[in-house]
Image: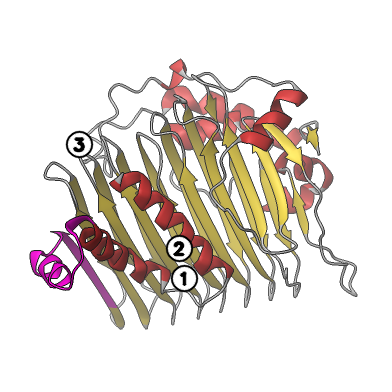
Amino acid sequence: MSTTTAPAPVWLSALRSGAAEELPNIAMPHFRGTPGWEFTEIPELDLDAFPTAQTADASIVSTVVDDAPRVFDHLPEGTIRLTQVDHAVVRESAALPDPTAAGKQAIVLPLETAAAEHPDLVERYLGRIETARTPFTARNDRDWVGGFFVYVPRGVTLDAPVLLTLIQDQAGRSVAPRTLIVLEDGASAEVWSQTTSSSPELEALVNGVVEIHVGANARLRFVDVQDLSEKSWIFGAQRATIDRDGWVDWITLGLGSAKGKVFQETSLDGAGAHGRVTGGYATHGKQHLDFDTLQTHMAPNTTSDLAFRGVLAEKSSTVWRGMIKVDEKGQQTDAFQESRNLLLGRKSHADNIPGLEIAANDVRCTHAAAIAQIDPEQLFYLRSRGLGLNAARRLVIEGFLAELVTRFEEGPVREALGEILQRRMDAVLG
């Protein structure tokens, strides 16, 4: 393995300098004063108190890679891996499929390297997919180093998943991970992403941006898991655009961090496009996680299906704010969203805010939300059959979360998610 850097092309330097000039004119969001920030207070956050990560010695980076905890315990054979420690990218051996007859080959590279070696591909998409402008996205434009680039050309299928790993190691610092995934028409791929801290005591900040483009008839499964130190901040802006008859299966799990907010948008831009989002979180202590999701239907005959489930213990709190937005061109849209939360602590708290904004007149859009504690009758039933109280509670909670796992067919993803949720419940329930 070796760390990688690359000189920035002129257009990328201009993008960074433009963001730096723009930043002073973008106000920080205010609690209840900025739409979308009604339930998450960040008055104690001083972004300038978290300078960007410093360049680390290669030997330190190598040690961190070897010792840091991983989210995914078991990887499918042939997994293509790319790892970043703070702002140092580690290029690991990758076995990509042979070029097609047309001479095109999939690309898995640090984003900076790809910008220098494949500027025509990167410039076309970078910064053009991200969500609404905020101080966080502008800082990411200015500060990101390394990054991840996954490109699958027309008609190419990656048989093994791509694993993107970010490990934060420097306390008191910020990292700005940047991910760009592009699938051309008819391509197919599975990308797994894990974000972790090298220590459970690390106090730091992660401010990430993910941009995804899925072409016509292309298929992407994106598994994104965050398991940072519970003393760190997390902010994110993630957006996927899907062309005609494209398909995205997006899985997001929020496990770690102390506090933060992530925006996630699935934009169905072509007729017949489909997006499915499955989200989960399990919090304890005083954690506060905020997910703001948007399903945008910009073309006819598009479908979306979003399901979030959360388990909250002790004094933790969560927010899920979901919006289905249908453009006037989005006739015959079929969209659904739900968020269900299970409260384990008397002082745990969840806010669910579903919403619909529909400009078309021939659609089917529905939503559901529920917040509840464990049903005493379920516990009574299980205990009457010989289970102790703790075992009965654990079984009810596992059954609640299992409905997320069963959204996927048997295979590596289903097994990985099951293992991750089991470990997280061990941590939450003690």
Tag 1: amino acid: Gly
- Whether the residues at callouts 1 and 3 have beta carbons within 8 Å, the answer is no
Of the residues tagged 2 and 3, which is closer to the observer?
A: 2
Circle 1 is placed at which residue position?
275
Give the Cα distance between marks 1 and 2. Answer: 22 Å
The stretch drawn in magenta includes residue 370: yes
Q: Compared with residue 388, is residue 128 higher up or lower down, i.e. above or below?
A: above
> Which amino acid, mark 2?
Gly
Closer to the chain start, of discs 1 and 3, is 3
Q: Is residue 126 visible?
A: no
Indicate the quadrant containing the C terminus: top left, top right, bottom left or bottom right.
top left
**Side of 217 relative to 339 (left or right):** right
Q: Which residue is mark 3?
A: 32
Relative side of 379 to 419, left or right: left
Gap between marks 2 and 3 measured at Cα: 37 Å
Q: Identify the residue position indicated by label 2 in the image.
A: 418
The region drawn magenta spans 365-390
* SS of the residue under disc 2: helix
